[in-house]
Image (spheres, helix red, strand yellow):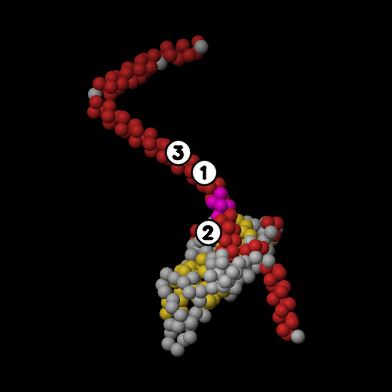
Amino acid sequence: MYQLVQFITRQRAFILFAFLEVLSLWFFYSVNNYPSAIFFNTSNYYAAKALSTSNSIREYSNLKEANTELASENNYLNSMIAKLQAQQLDKSIVNYKADSIVASRFKFVVAKVSGLTTSQFNNYITIDKGSADGLAPGMGVISSTGVVGKVKSCSEHYSVVISILHSEYSISAKLKSNNEIGSVKWKGVNSEIVEMTEVSRYKIVRVKDTIVTSDFNYVFPPNITIGYVKKVGVKPDQTFHEIDVQLATNFHTLAYVYVINNKLLGEQKALEEKSEDVKAK
């Protein structure tokens, strides 16, 4: 207490000056309307800027949690969409409805991208889920916007995915507008463009048509978006269209993916292989 009194005594001139300065400013702004309005508006402006900056910092700090929540929600929605699509009645087949187990055969696992390449001739993606999470080689991988690739190998906690941007990887696809079947494969040049082949030149293909996975995929549910027709052409004496497809997935900003586990894949493959053995005999 004694030291406080000593400090005030030593600094009494400055303290008095500061007090009188504050008092004079208060009188000046309270009596004069124009400076008062300027002071009020200026203080409000900087207070709003400070609040905006504070909110931005808070939102950025919560961004990782928000992204994780969105990825989990998309995972649930993907499961529901796959199930509903499989349960839809095919209008061309009277009274057909998919078995409930078949309809719900696809299970989705959310994973975060740990690393990827886009500029190589054969590109791969590393994700932070592995065999401990139920992943296995051959499983399909999609993003929230479209097809990504399929699992190549797994460790306990990580997996390597063959990207659709791989020279030796192709996907059975179809034109959404007319269900015409073809194959989609990367040409090894532009990381945003793939090529669709095996579509007859006599079939109608339009720019901006949607390309989706066909019903003949082991690893992908049908009607998962691959991309959109960017360019259509036919060379002389050729049987098929040359179709450039703009990929729906942006690999340069890819952060989360969904790994698809077809729970009936083993049963389907075993049956088909058994049928092939019977034919061979």
Q: Nearer the viewer, residue 42 or 234?
A: 234
Part of the protein shown in magenta: 69-74
Q: Mark 2 vs mark 3: which is more N-terminal?
A: 3
Q: CA distance from mark 1 to mark 3?
A: 11 Å
Q: Marks 1/2: CA distance? A: 23 Å
Residue 69: x percent and y percent?
A: 56, 49
Amino acid tagged 1: Ser
Which residue does the numbered mark 3 point to in the structure image? 54
Q: Are marks 1 and 3 in contact (CB under 8 Å)?
A: no
Residue found at x 56% / y 52%: 73
Q: Secondary structure at mark 3?
A: helix
Q: Residue 37's mark?
A: none
Q: To which quarter of the image does residue 89 belong? A: bottom right
Q: Secondary structure at mark 1?
A: helix
Residue marked by disc 1 = 61
Q: Is residue 127 visible?
A: no
Q: Answer few, some or many: residues within 10 Å of disc 1's Cα (few below 14, many 20 plus, some between 14 and 19).
A: few
* Residue 161 sits above or below residue 26 on the image: below
Graded by Cα atoms within 10 Å as few (under 14), some (14 to 19) or many (20 or more), the crowding at tag 3 reads: few
Q: Is residue 175 left or right of residue 97?
A: left
- Residue 147 x %, y %: 54, 65
User: Is tag 1's residue or tag 3's residue first in the polypeptide sequence?
Assistant: 3
Q: Which residue is mark 2?
A: 144
- Asked whether the viewer can see residue 47, the reply is yes
Amino acid carrying label 2: it is Ser
Give the residue furthest to the right. Answer: 281
Q: Residue at x 62, y 63 (%)?
A: 103
Placement of 32 over or under 188, stated as above or below:
above
